[in-house]
Image (cartoon, rainbow, N blue to C red):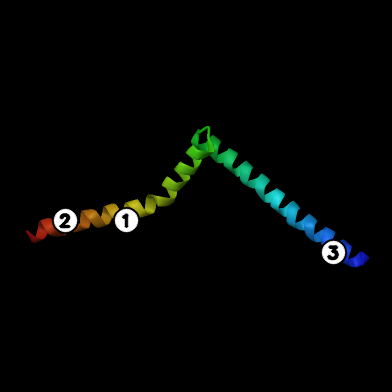
Amino acid sequence: MNEITKKIIIWFFEKYANDYWIDKQMKLADKEEMKKYKVNTIEELRKIQIDIQHQPLEDSYDVGYEDGYARCWKDN
């Protein structure tokens, strides 16, 4: 019974210590990015991160739009 208790205690420690460490690292990373982009709230930071993530999609949409417009203009 003693071995099982030790394994359970070690498992809980590893699980919650790891979760705590990840949460702490995420908060530090968020603070660094908030300083980088000069924003004060996490909502503003998330909006900036989403905009950065969607930028390649917007760029490819713009290129496709311009290409289609140029083809239409060339055909007529």
**Inter-mark Cα distance, 2 to 3:** 68 Å
Labels 3 and 1 touching (C-beta < 8 A)? no
Which tag, 3 or 1, sits closer to the chain's start?
3
In front here: 59 or 50?
50
Labels 1 and 2 touching (C-beta < 8 A)? no
Q: Which residue is mark 3?
A: 7
Vertical side of 7 occupied by 65: above or below: above
Question: Image check: 76 left or right of 52?
Answer: left
Vertical side of 67 occupied by 25: above or below: above
Residue type at mark 1: give it. Answer: Ser
In front here: 41 or 53?
41
Q: Position of residue 6 (x, y in %)?
A: 88, 62
* Mark 2 Cα-neighbour bin, 10 Å: few <14, some 14–19, many ≥20: few
Q: Quadrant of the N terminus?
A: bottom right
Q: Residue at x 49, y 37 (%)?
A: 37
Q: Residue at x 79, y 61 (%)?
A: 11
Q: Which residue is mark 1?
A: 60
Figure disc tally: 3
Q: Quadrant of the C terminus?
A: bottom left
Q: Residue at x 50, y 39 (%)?
A: 43
Residue type at mark 2: give it. Answer: Ala
Secondary structure of residue under mark 1:
helix
* Mark 3 Cα-neighbour bin, 10 Å: few <14, some 14–19, many ≥20: few
Which tag, 1 or 2, sits closer to the chain's start?
1
Q: Which residue is mark 2?
A: 70
Using the rendered view, name the quadrant where residue 30 is placed: top right
Q: Position of residue 73 (x, y in %)?
A: 11, 56
Using the rendered view, name the quadrant where residue 64 is placed: bottom left
